[in-house]
Image (cartoon, rainbow, N blue to C red):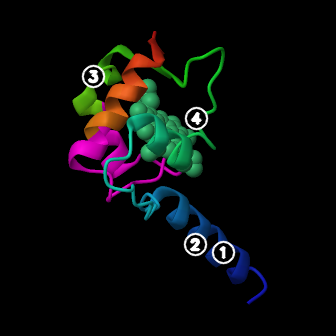
Amino acid sequence: MKTILPVMLLGFVLFALGGCTRNNDYMPLSGATGEKIFKEACVQCHTPVSGNVMILRPEMANADAIMERVKNGKGIGMPAFPNLTGDSAQSLAEYVLINSVTR
Ligand code: HEC
């Protein structure tokens, strides 16, 4: 019993880390601008650095890729926002694109 407990704990932690992305149930107000959504839902992790909210890899630097990433999240860091779809996702993606650098 003494050795099995840490092994089980480790297994659980690895499962939790590698498993699913977290969901964030943030819900935008109808008609909210991309800037407003970003400041409410994203800025706590994506803090702007000299005016740029993000550094995007070239393959991420388009609205479709950004909307996909926001909807589905990635890994343990980036939560999924299943409520950010349609017009709100589109204006959010445009805000991110305009205010990011691509590298
Ligand atoms: C809890 C922290 C957190 C929140 C909140 C968050 N993100 Fe992220 N985001 C991350 C992390 C961490 C990554 C890097 C994930 C990876 O590549 O493994 C990331 C990656 C991204 C990427 C991909 C960047 C690239 O070049 O690969 C985009 C786009 C993005 N986030 C947009 C958003 C938007 C838009 C919001 C608000 C709706 C948001 N994020 C909210 C933590 C967060």
Quarter of image, res 47: top right
Q: What residue is pinned by disc 4?
A: 46
Q: What residue is pinned by disc 1?
A: 9
Whether residue 68 is visible to the viewer of this picture, yes or no, is no
Residue 31 part of the magenta segment: no
Looking at the image, how many numbered discs can be counted on the residues?
4
Which element is circle 4 on? loop
Disc 1 marks a residue whose amino acid type is Leu
Give the mark nearer the N terminus: 1 vs 3.
1
Mark 4 near mark 1, Cβ–Cβ under 8 Å? Answer: no
Locate residue 16, reporting x and y percent: 53, 66
Mark 1 near mark 2, Cβ–Cβ under 8 Å? Answer: yes
- Please rate how many residues cluster around mark 4, counting C-alpha atoms within 10 Å: few if below 14, some from 14 to 19, many from 20: some
Query: Which residue is at the front of the view, 34 or 97?
Result: 34
Mark 2 near mark 3, Cβ–Cβ under 8 Å? Answer: no
| Dot label at residue 62 | 3
Locate residue 90, reporting x and y percent: 26, 37
Q: CA distance from mark 1 to mark 2?
A: 5 Å
